[in-house]
């Protein structure tokens, strides 16, 4: 049984991003100024983002044109392939047809350059000379390091300390592309020093790293902040994934019944599912859309839907999102890209409206599924999309037990070739559920 691949040409790279904000049946609650508690204005946001990015964040339009220069860089790896996982189907003895969109073919090995390239482009157009960001597992930091190098901008990355320790080659990748990388919390910032004074062994969190990055931004001229997930404009940029997947499923001659993605901050999930949610809202099909999060950091299934800060120090606007609380420090799980206390407001809103479902999976079950996938399909998935694989396997087994065909589509948003310490721990029986 051979793999089945559904390929597009460079002319099929989307020419516009899709904005779900235009189609929500209820408007998304606006972010609030942390001081006045009033909806933020454009000028409030331009302290940390360039104006052209802020306008995208607040854009009400259904479609936003992709600049030609961004699209030309996308062509280095896009369109990404869609494959049918026939060997996994055989291993599971399921009548389900399983398809996956593989974003690991990008130079950085994940979906993150879809937004990193766009954000670097808009920052350069705004005259920004230096960009500061945070990263969890290192996928976003790597992608922004690449993008800023392509556009001639300095890049500084605050990497969550536990991932900095677990994934040393991510740091090497970022430095190869010219970025400066700090383990967070660090003594480079006032907030980092405060955290370390209270807990010298603090493993860090994305919330802490965001606070350090923002402090860096306000202290340096010609510097802006870039975020790799959560915000509306990041979700917008990622929708090239789902738009391509719609074309490719048409080539396959099938329409998915179930669409699955992992969620931490929400960017890859939004990128895959938002174009399908548009079809769902238009009445084309009642797709089941499943968000899969780690059981140890489950903001959708265990968090509260309320206004909260995006960072630990309380420097960001307040956002209406599912949250575990800004001071939540996640356990030291290996899916570093999913270790965030909150969920993207747009993903949270879709969940509130019943447009998507959410489940939480344990780390050991996730790695069992990852190994099953690797031993059948050959690709070693990153820990983050392995959460999606875990849910896909559950759905495929249900299809087998029910004796009926289901068409399942998921986003394999990155490879795991720089995450082998996690696999080493799992295969040695040292990985535990926290």
Image (cartoon, grey):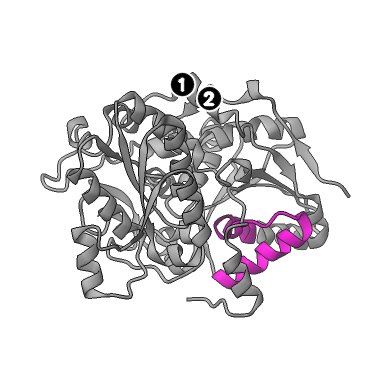
Residue in the picture at 15% in, 41% down: 38
Q: Determine whether, in the image, residue 92 is placed left or right of residue 111.
A: right
The reply to whether residue 313 is visible in this rendering is yes
Q: Determine whether, in the image, residue 45 is placed left or right of residue 335.
A: left
Of all residues shown, which one is farthest toward the right? 1
Residue stretch in magenta: 363-391
10 Å neighbourhood of mark 1: few (<14), some, or many (≥20)? few
Camera-side residue of 410 and 334: 334
Q: CB atoms at circles 1 and 2 under 8 Å apart?
A: yes
Structural distance between the alpha carbons of marks 1 and 2: 6 Å
Q: Secondary structure at mark 1?
A: loop
Rendered view: 42 above or below 431 = above
Residue under label 2: 71
Q: Is residue 366 magenta?
A: yes
The reply to whether residue 23 is visible in this rendering is no
Q: Determine whether, in the image, residue 77 is placed left or right of residue 182.
A: right
Camera-side residue of 279 and 104: 104
- Which of the 4 image quadrants contains residue 184? bottom left
- Which of the 4 image quadrants contains residue 207? bottom left
Rendered view: 366 above or below 117 = below
Helix, strand or loop for the magenta stretch, by majority = helix
Camera-side residue of 414 and 56: 414
Residue in the picture at 42% in, 71% down: 331
Of all residues shown, which one is farthest toward the left? 36
Q: Where in the figure is residue 389, as x and y percent of width and height?
A: 64, 57
Camera-side residue of 395 and 90: 90
Figure disc tally: 2
Residue under label 1: 67
Rendered view: 133 above or below 49 = below
Q: Where in the figure is residue 308, as x and y percent of width and height?
A: 26, 54
Q: Which mark is residue 185?
A: none
């Amino acid at each position: 049984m051979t793999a089945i691949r559904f390929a597009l040409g460079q002319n099929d790279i989307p020419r516009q991003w899709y904005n779900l904000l235009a189609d929500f049946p209820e408007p998304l609650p606006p972010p609030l100024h942390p001081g006045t508690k009033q909806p933020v204005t454009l000028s409030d946001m331009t302290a940390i983002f360039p104006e052209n990015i802020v306008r995208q964040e607040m854009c009400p339009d259904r479609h936003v044109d992709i600049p030609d220069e961004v699209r030309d860089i996308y062509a280095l790896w896009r369109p990404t392939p869609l494959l049918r996982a026939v060997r996994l189907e055989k291993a599971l003895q399921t009548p389900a047809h399983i398809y996956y969109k593989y974003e690991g073919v990008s130079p950085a090995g994940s979906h993150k350059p879809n937004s990193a390239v766009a954000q670097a482009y808009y920052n350069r157009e705004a005259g920004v000379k230096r960009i500061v960001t945070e990263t969890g597992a290192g996928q976003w930091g790597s992608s922004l390091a690449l993008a800023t190098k392509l556009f001639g901008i300095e890049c500084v990355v605050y990497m969550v300390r536990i991932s900095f320790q677990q994934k040393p080659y991510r740091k090497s990748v970022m430095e190869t592309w010219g970025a400066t990388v700090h383990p967070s919390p660090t003594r480079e910032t006032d907030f980092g020093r405060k955290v370390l004074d209270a807990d010298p062994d603090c493993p860090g969190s994305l919330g802490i790293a965001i606070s350090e990055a923002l402090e860096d931004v306000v202290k340096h001229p010609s510097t802006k902040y870039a975020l790799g997930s959560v915000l509306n404009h990041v979700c917008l940029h990622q929708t090239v994934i789902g738009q391509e997947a719609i074309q490719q499923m048409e080539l396959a001659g099938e329409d998915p019944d179930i669409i699955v993605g992992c969620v931490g901050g929400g960017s890859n999930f939004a990128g895959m599912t938002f174009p399908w949610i548009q079809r769902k809202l238009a009445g084309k099909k009642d797709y089941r859309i499943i968000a899969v999060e780690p059981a140890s950091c489950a903001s959708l299934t265990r968090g509260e839907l309320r206004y909260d800060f995006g960072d630990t120090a309380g420097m960001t606007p307040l956002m209406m999102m599912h949250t575990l609380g800004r001071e939540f420090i996640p356990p030291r799980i290996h899916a570093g890209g999913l270790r965030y206390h909150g969920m993207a407001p747009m993903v949270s809103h879709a969940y509130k409206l019943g447009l998507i479902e959410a489940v939480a999976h344990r780390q050991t079950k996730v790695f069992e599924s990852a190994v099953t996938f690797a031993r059948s399909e050959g690709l070693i998935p990153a820990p983050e999309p392995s959460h999606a694989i875990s849910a896909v396997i559950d759905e495929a087994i249900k299809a087998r037990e029910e004796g009926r065909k289901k068409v399942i589509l998921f986003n394999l948003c990155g490879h795991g070739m720089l995450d082998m310490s996690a696999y080493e721990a799992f295969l040695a029986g040292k990985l535990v559920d926290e």
